[in-house]
Amino acid sequence: MTAALEVRGLTTRFETRGGDVTAVNNVSFSVEKGRILGLVGESGSGKSVTGFSILGLIDPPGEVCAGEVLVDGNDLRKLSDEDMRKMRGNRVAMVFQDPMMTLNPVLRVGDQMAMAVRVHRKMSKAEAWEESRKALDTVGIPSPEERLRAYPHQLSGGMRQRVAIAMALLHSPAVIIADEATTALDVSIQGQILAEVRDLADRTGAAIVWITHDLAVVSSLADDICVMYAGRIVERGTAEQVIGQPRHPYTKGLLDSIPARHEPGTPLPQIPGSTPQLSRLPSGCPFRPRCPRATEVCATEPPVVTVDGQTVLCHHPLERT
Amino acid sequence: MTDPILKIDHVSKRFTRMPGLAERWVGKLTGGGKPVVVHALSDVSLEVTKREVLGIVGESGCGKSTLGRVVAGIYAPSDGSVTLHGKPIAREHGGNVDKLTTQVQMIHQDPFASLNPRMKVGETLAEGPRHHKIIPANQVRERMRELLEKVGLEGAYADRLPHQFSGGQRQRVAIARALAMEPEVLVLDEAVASLDVSIQAQVLNLFMDLRRDLGLTALFISHDLSVVRHVCDRVAIMYLGRLVELAPADELYAEPKHPYTQALFASVPTVGTGKGRFEAIKGEIPSPIDPPPGCAFHPRCPFAGPRCRAEVPRLTGAGTARTVACHLNDGGVEMKTEAAA
C-alpha cells in the first residue's frame, strides 16, 4: 500500500541568540490512507514544529533545511509558493489547538467556510454553502443550517473545534494534521470528537497525523505511534507495540509515570531531571542524562534499531519479552 | 471517623453582572437589560476530616474552581458558610472579602502566572510569613532555605528569579510558598494540569511525601480522573455547580453510581484501552446562567424521566459513606404524587 504522506529526513532549524537550535532533527515517518499516526512528545520535543514544517508554515528565523515531504508522490518542499498554496487546505489540511486561531471572529461560519471552498473550487456561493453544510453534518454538528448563520463566538468550544475540523475536511484532503486539537476541550467533548475523527479516517480514507502530549489519547485513537524527544523520533511502531512493549527507555519512563498504571497512593516511577533545552543538548543521545540505562557509549550517536517494524533510536533498547 | 475540621455548609455562590448603560437603555424598550446571574455553586455541602485529601472532579463550568476559591477565602459565599474548626474562613463587608485565617492556602494551575517574575523566589516565599509574623524576622532566610530543600530544590535557589526555573521547578516553588504559611489545609486547583507527564509524576510524588510528613489536609481539584484516584481518599463529582456524587475513591472508581459519573468515566481515554472505544456523552454542558430545571444533567442523561425534569435530586445515602444526587437512587425517575406533595 502506498503512503498518503511520507516524511523523509525532515530537519528544521531556528536561529536564536543562543545559537542555532535544531527543533526537528532528521524525522522520518509515513502514514497510509485511512490510518491515524499519533505523534507524541512533551513540551519542546518538536512535535508541533514537525506539523508546521510539513505544511511549510515555518517562518524566519526558522527554516526547514533538509528532508522530503511526499504527498501524492509530490515533494511539497520543491513546490513554488503558488503551488504550495494550492495544496494547503486542499490536499493537506491542518487543525490547530485553539479553534479561534482558525476561525475569523467577524465572519459568519458559513461565509468563511464558503470562502474556503471557493478558494480551491469554482462554484457559486449557494453551492459553497451547501458544501459547507455537508461538512458540518459530517462532523456531527446538530442543525448545521443554523450554525452556518452563527458567528464563532456564539458557538461553544467543542462546537468551534468541530467547525475547524469540518473546514479541514472541505476538500476531502489526503492528509490532515491535527495539533493538540482536543487538548483545550472537556473530556466528554473530547470523547465525542475522537470518536468522530476515528470514524472519519475509516470512512474518508484520509491519513491523519494526530499531534498530542496525551498518551492516553493516542493509545486509544492511533494505529501507529511516533514518540519524539528533543526533536528526534526516538521510537516508532504500531500502537500495540509502542504502548504494549515500549523499547526506548524514554517511552517506558513516560508510560510508567502515568498514575492510572499504579496502585493508588504508591510513589510513581519518575523520570529524573527536566525536559532538555534544545540549545544545550548533550552529545550523542539527548536522553542520556535522564536515562537509567545510559553508559559511556551513549555519548555517541545512537543507532537505529528495527525489529518487526518497531524502530528505536537507542544504544540500549529494552529487551523484547 | 474523626470529626471534620473543614465544613462547607449549604454553600452557594452567585456572580452578578450588572448591565451596561447602553444595555439598560435598550432594555427599557425591549424589556431586557436585567442583571445576569451566574450560579457557580448551588447548595454544596462537604466535610473534610484532618489529614484527608478530598478530590473535586468535574468539567469546565462545574464550579470546582469556585469551590476551591470559596474554601481558600478568596470569595465569600453568597449563601451558607465555610468554617475551619468552627470559625468562618472569610467574610464579606462593603464589597470586599476579608480573609480571616491564614490556615488555608491555595496552589494555582499555572506556575508561570502565579509567581511574580521580578521577585527572587526567596522573597516570594518570605512575603507572607513576614507580613503575618509567622516566623521571627531573623529566622526567615534560614526557613526559606529549608522550605526549598523540603520541596526538592536547593536552598541557594532562593536568590534566583522565576524565569530561571523550569515549569516543574516553579510548581515546587508555588508549593513551598503555600507551605511557608504553615497552613492546615491546602487547596490545589489543577496543580499538575499544566505539567508534562514526566514532571507531573515528580510533583505528585512530592505532594504525597509532604502529605505524609506534614499531615496535610487538602482539597485536590482536577479534571484528571487518574491523578485524582492516585492521591485522593474521597472524591466529589460536580456538575453545573452541584455535587452529584461523593464517595471513597476506591468505591467510586469500582462502581460509579450517578449517570454523569458513569458517562465521565466512559469518555476518558486510558492508556491501553485499544482503539476506537469512545462512549461519548451526548450534548453539551449547559450554561450556568440558565441551568436546566430539575436535575441539571437530565438533558444529557440516558435514564432521565419526568421527575428529573421537575425536581432537583438531593444527595442521599447509597451504601457506606457514599452519597449520590440522582432520582434513580431515590425512588425512580417517574413522577409520583407523593413526591410532588
Image (cartoon, coloured by chain):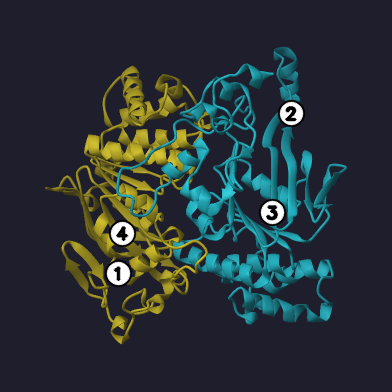
| Amino acid at the residue labelled 2 | Gly
Picture disc at residue B20: 2
- Element marked by disc 3: strand
Chain in yellow colour: A
Instruction: Kindly indicate whether the residues beneath marks 4 and 1 are on one polypeptide chain.
Output: yes
A214 to B281, vertically: above or below: below
Q: Distance between the residues labelled 2 and 3?
A: 41 Å
| Amino acid at the residue labelled 3 | Val
Q: Can you identify the residue that label 1 sits on?
A: A248
Label 1 close to label 2 by CB (< 8 Å): no
Q: In this view, does B145 lie to the left or right of A206?
A: right
Chain B is shown in which shade?
Answer: cyan
Q: Distance between the residues labelled 3 and 4?
A: 38 Å
Chain ID at mark 4: A
N-terminal of the two: label 2 or label 3? 2
Q: Residues within 10 Å of mark 3 (few under 14, many from 20)?
A: many
Q: Can you identify the residue that label 3 sits on?
A: B48
Q: Nearer the viewer, mark 3 or mark 1?
A: 3
Q: Can you identify the residue that label 4 sits on?
A: A243
Q: Residue at x 21, y 38 (%)?
A: A205
Give the quadrant of residue A12.
bottom left
Name the foreground residue: A85 vs B263: B263
| Amino acid at the residue labelled 1 | His
N-terminal of the two: label 4 or label 1? 4
Label 3 close to label 4 by CB (< 8 Å): no
Percent position (x, y) of residue A20?
39, 70
Q: In this view, does B224 lie to the left or right of B271?
A: right
Instruction: Kindly indicate whether the residues beneath marks 3 and 4 are on one polypeptide chain.
Output: no
